[in-house]
């Protein structure tokens, strides 16, 4: 471990309250005199906080949980010699049950297959339509970034853009009004909009800029555009669908007859794109 | 094995409360869902068979993670394959959403899911030795000494590996949300 690693190690120990006695005093003295270590400490703290927020990293699936619970409920046989018969039962039991009941299970599986087939086909079609909308949103986003889709109205006024779309698209929508945070510096800025065609219907493309990053919002009628699939977050009657495509974060949702696709090129930080509608959220500090 | 007071092994629980942690560890090691499930199941089977030999003051959690890792290493040896290339099968695992209640702030819930997905992707890009240390340290909150015991290496090695993959690590760019 070189000197640099040693300082980094002390930072880790300090954050974990594992530095003691003279070590912590020496470290604090060093910290006062070393800007690099202070910066590293803050970065390590931020990284640690991020990891802690995402606990648990994975959740055991229910079938596994049930199997383990069944194992745990078996009466224990303690001693130096494990009960081989019982151990094998625990290890392979659930598979053997499946084998011995194969014919019965096959019938059940066939019934389930038919029922699922009848219910899944519409779902598959729906997901395919949703994928089309997502792909269109991503393609549009890329095209706009590459200056292949010039804006037809350039304005930072949500009211002006909303008015411009009136009568041009087969649905009514209203962009959220500008909301400035207390420091007076909005995290994003509306840049403009243009019309597009999606499945032979007019759709709206609205663009925002956050520093050097682009956020686009594709808006279409829910008769032609579907939001489905991905990681789903439900909130009342709203369901948000989170997807990633080629490094872009795409969030889709439908409400009041309109389907939205929010595409962000902000690297590694999809939550920033949410600030388009939630800039003045009181809890946005949680996501910085 | 490290001794901890107030953690007597209970035969009827076998540390079932650690199942998410063990499953995460198994996924971090194997990067394959079915393998991870088998690893966890085998861990509990072996643990149950050996509970009688465990001292009352033993650290069950650390012991379970050690068992799981040993099973994994044995499997690798049997396959005569190197651990560095394993097909990734962890994309699209929907985790945590189902544990939330309807009362949760949907925006916070949404962001939390995004964050978790990004963190998972970033961690899975790390080398195996760093993946498991981050999991054991940051998610399972095991001490460096406990991690060293599980990994069968000095605590200093654990710390230097963790330090090498801190926030400035090239693999960790995704963690900078």
Image: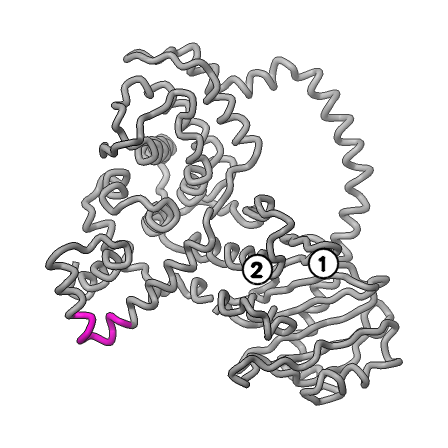
Q: Residue furthest bottom?
A: A154
Vertical comparison of A23 with B153: above or below = below
**Residue at 52% in and 45% down:** B89
How many numbered markers are drawn? 2
Q: Is residue A33 magenta?
A: yes
- Taking the spot 49% from the left edge, 34% from the top edge, the residue there is B37
Q: Closest to the observer: A255 or A192?
A: A255
What is the number of the mark on residue B108? 2
Residue pictured at 81% horizontal, 70% vertical: A198
Residue A36 on the magenta span:
yes
Q: Which residue is mark 1?
A: A131
Q: Magenta segment, which residues?
A: A30-38
Q: Secondary structure at mark 1?
A: helix
Q: Quadrant of residue B111?
A: bottom right
**Image quarter of the N terminus of chain A:** bottom left
Q: Say above or below: A201 vs B88.
A: below
Counting from the top left corner in percent of width and height, residue A221 is at 83, 67
Q: Quadrant of residue B146?
A: top left
Residue A263 lies, in percent from the top left, at 64, 69
Residue B74 visible in the current orientation: no
The subunit carrying tag 2 is B
- Residue A237 lies, with reference to residue B74, above or below; the image says below
Distance from Cα at disc 2 to Cα at disc 1: 25 Å
Q: Nearer the viewer, residue A142 or A207?
A: A207
Q: Secondary structure at mark 2?
A: helix
Task: Pinpoint residue B46: horizontal percent, then vertical percent.
Answer: 37, 23
Q: Look at the magenta stretch and give its main secondary structure.
A: helix
């Amino acid at each position: 471990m070189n000197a640099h690693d040693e300082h980094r190690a002390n930072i880790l120990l300090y954050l974990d309250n594992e530095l003691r006695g003279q070590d912590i005093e020496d470290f604090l003295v060093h910290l006062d005199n070393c800007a690099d270590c202070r910066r590293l400490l803050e970065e390590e703290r931020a990284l640690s906080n991020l990891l802690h927020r995402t606990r648990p990293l994975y959740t055991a699936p229910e079938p596994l949980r049930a199997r383990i619970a069944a194992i745990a409920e078996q009466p224990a046989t303690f001693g130096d010699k494990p009960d081989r018969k019982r151990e094998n039962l625990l290890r392979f039991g659930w598979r053997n049950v499946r084998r011995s009941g194969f014919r019965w299970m096959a019938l059940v599986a066939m019934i389930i297959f038919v029922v699922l087939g009848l219910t899944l086909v519409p779902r598959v079609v729906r997901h395919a339509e949703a994928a089309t909308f997502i792909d269109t949103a991503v393609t549009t986003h890329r095209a706009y970034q590459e200056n292949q889709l010039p804006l037809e109205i350039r304005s930072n006024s949500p009211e002006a853009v909303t008015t411009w779309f009136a009568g041009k698209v087969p649905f009514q929508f209203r962009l959220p009004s500008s909301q400035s945070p207390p420091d007076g510096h909005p995290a994003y800025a509306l840049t403009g909009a243009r019309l597009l065609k999606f499945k032979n219907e007019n759709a709206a493309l609205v663009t925002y800029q956050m520093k050097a990053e682009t956020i686009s919002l594709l808006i279409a009628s829910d008769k032609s555009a579907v939001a489905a699939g991905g990681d789903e977050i439900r909130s009342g009657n709203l369901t948000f669908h989170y997807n990633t495509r080629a490094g872009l974060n795409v969030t889709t949702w439908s409400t009041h007859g309109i389907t939205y696709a929010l595409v962000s090129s902000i690297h590694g930080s999809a939550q920033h794109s949410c600030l388009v509608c939630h800039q003045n959220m009181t809890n946005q500090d949680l996501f910085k | 094995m490290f001794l901890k007071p107030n953690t007597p092994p209970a035969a009827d629980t076998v540390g079932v409360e650690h199942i998410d942690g063990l499953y995460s560890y198994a996924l971090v090691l194997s990067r394959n869902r079915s393998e991870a499930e088998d690893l966890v199941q085998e861990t509990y089977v072996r643990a149950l068979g050996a509970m009688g030999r465990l001292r009352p003051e033993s650290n069950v959690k650390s012991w379970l993670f050690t068992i799981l890792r040993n099973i994994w290493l044995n499997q690798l040896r049997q396959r005569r394959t190197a651990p560095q290339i394993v097909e990734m099968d962890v994309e699209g695992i929907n985790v945590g959403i189902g544990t939330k209640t309807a009362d949760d702030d949907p925006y916070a819930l949404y962001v939390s899911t995004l964050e978790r997905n990004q963190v998972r992707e970033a961690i899975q890009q790390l080398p195996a030795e760093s993946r498991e240390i981050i999991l054991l340290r940051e998610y399972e909150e095991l001490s460096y000494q406990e991690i060293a015991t599980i990994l069968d290496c000095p605590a200093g090695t654990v710390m230097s590996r963790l330090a090498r993959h801190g926030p400035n690590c090239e693999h960790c760019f995704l963690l900078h949300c």
